[in-house]
Image (spheres, rainbow, N blue to C red):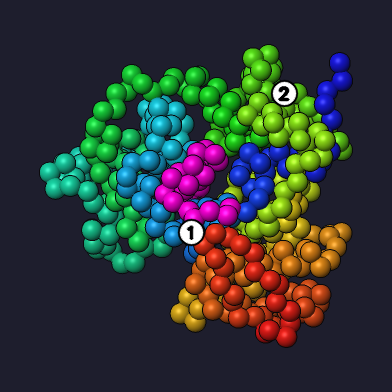
């Protein structure tokens, strides 16, 4: 029996639908919307780079539009989320604590994230720090003074910071809240007073559940894509795909122009029917964080979107092809280009240092209007008063000259009219 055949456009739309990226949000955003968006993705990766808004805030903006960033901290502080190592360091729905607990119990599998040598060498100091928190309450790394000069990165943390991270990774501490994006650590028994380790999933059950959920979060999957979502190693995805298909949780499909066996999550069954009739049409245009789930797996982004993307912030400047923190441009179901941006907060200027379209992308009126709107909305959310353009294609120089004054977006996300070059 022949499998349902999806066009490449429809396959992309199913993935974007699962990620909440089909259409713009038109509602005022609440803390529940933030939590729901994270539940839909499963994981929200944390990164501290802030040439533009830090990645977790940016990923939520791409999905929710103009929202107060403090809602993320509120969700963490009120116990709807927790932090731990998943894809990397992530905000995770609190109901998934049982899913990740086994990693805290099997520290030998965490690589550089946990050093048994450090634990053994500093056991006394670590125990004293734990006692201090028990007796005096939550702490930040900033509460402790460095005594040997300024640190140079995660490899040169002050001892107390490494002690805190060791206790966090081992599950003895949790992040109770964040203040100015700094972690506030407290005892796990105080953050989750009713937790019992009997509720933790075994390694085998947890990995099976992570693979199953990866199918749901991605919407459309193939075996080679599944392990990356939770950074699983040496797992066998194909037998599970067969089991989930037999159980009705996945629907086997073919994708036009792509090789391999593909599956659609049953949670996308209604959208699959629309996609097969070519009636699932993404209308959303957004700038994406480099740590957005849509692009964090380079091979998947390349296969599904034809988008070859590498994060260059860890690459020496002389070897970068595009820029330090380049934002992919999603436009109506396609990744059409990338943009290197920097927010100059003291001047209230959102600088587009560079913008590049993908090979073969045509720059018609609709595309230019969509991208202008996405840049303007992003700049407004950042608090910018002006967008400035530096290295952009000639077609954008002609349309936008050197930039424009930012037009306020509305809370409900209504689009504002494209402003031509004369406004700059």
- 7 relative position to 56: left or right: right
Q: Is 75 contained in the magenta span?
A: no
Q: Answer with the quarter of the image where residue 274 lies.
A: top right
- 363 relative position to 106: left or right: right
The span from disc 1 to disc 2 (Cα, nearest Å) is 36 Å
Q: Answer with the quarter of the image where residue 259 lies.
A: top right
Point out residue 412 in the picture as x, y percentages from the top left corner. Answer: 54, 59
- 306 relative position to 136: left or right: right
Q: Where residue 251 is drawn, which disc sits there?
A: 2
> Which of the pair 329/130 is nearer the observer?
329
Q: Identify the image quadrant of the C terminus.
A: bottom right
Residue at mark 1: 67
- 131 relative position to 68: left or right: left
Q: Is 38 contained in the magenta span?
A: yes
The residues colored magenta run 25-46
| Crowding at mark 1 (Cα within 10 Å: few <14, some 14-19, many 20+) | some
Point out residue 232 in the picture as x, y percentages from the top left corner. Answer: 56, 31
> Which of the pair 364/344 is nearer the observer?
364
The residue tagged with tag 2: helix, strand or loop?
strand
| Crowding at mark 2 (Cα within 10 Å: few <14, some 14-19, many 20+) | many
């Amino acid at each position: 029996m022949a499998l349902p055949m999806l066009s490449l456009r429809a396959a992309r739309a199913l993935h974007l639908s699962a990620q909440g990226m089909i259409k713009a949000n038109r509602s005022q955003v609440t803390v529940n919307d933030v939590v729901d968006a994270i539940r839909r993705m499963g994981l929200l990766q944390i990164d501290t780079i802030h040439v533009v808004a830090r990645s977790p805030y940016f990923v939520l903006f791409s999905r929710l539009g103009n929202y107060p960033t403090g809602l993320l901290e509120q969700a963490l502080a009120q116990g709807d989320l927790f932090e731990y190592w998943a894809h990397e360091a992530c905000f995770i729905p609190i109901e998934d604590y049982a899913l990740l607990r086994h990693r805290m119990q099997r520290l030998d599998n965490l690589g550089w994230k946990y050093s048994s040598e450090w634990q053994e060498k500093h056991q006394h100091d670590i125990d004293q720090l734990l006692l201090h928190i028990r007796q005096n309450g939550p702490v930040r790394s900033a509460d402790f003074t460095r005594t040997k000069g300024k640190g140079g990165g995660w490899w040169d943390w002050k001892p107390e910071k490494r002690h805190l991270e060791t206790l966090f990774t081992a599950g003895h501490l949790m992040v109770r809240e964040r203040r100015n994006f700094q972690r506030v650590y407290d005892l796990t028994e105080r953050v989750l007073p009713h937790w019992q380790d009997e509720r933790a999933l075994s390694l085998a059950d947890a990995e099976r559940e992570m693979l199953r959920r990866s199918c749901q979060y991605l919407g459309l999957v193939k075996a080679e894509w599944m392990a990356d979502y939770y950074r699983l190693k040496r797992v066998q995805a194909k037998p599970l795909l067969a089991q989930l298909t037999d159980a009705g949780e996945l629907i086997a499909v073919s994708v036009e122009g792509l090789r391999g066996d593909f599956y659609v999550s049953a949670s996308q069954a209604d959208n699959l029917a629309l996609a097969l009739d070519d009636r699932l049409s993404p209308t959303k245009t957004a700038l994406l964080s480099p740590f957005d789930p849509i692009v964090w797996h380079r091979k998947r982004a390349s296969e599904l979107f034809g988008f070859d993307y590498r994060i260059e912030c860890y690459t020496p400047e002389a070897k970068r092809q595009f820029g330090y923190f380049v934002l992919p441009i999603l436009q109506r179901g396609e990744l059409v280009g990338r943009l290197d941006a920097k927010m100059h907060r003291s001047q209230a200027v959102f600088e587009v240092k560079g913008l590049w379209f993908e090979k073969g992308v045509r720059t018609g009126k609709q595309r230019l209007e969509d991208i202008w709107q996405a840049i303007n909305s992003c700049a407004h959310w950042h608090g910018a008063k002006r967008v400035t353009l530096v290295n952009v294609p000639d077609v954008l120089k002609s349309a936008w000259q050197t930039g424009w004054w930012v037009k306020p977006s509305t809370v409900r996300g209504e689009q504002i009219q494209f402003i031509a070059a004369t406004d700059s």
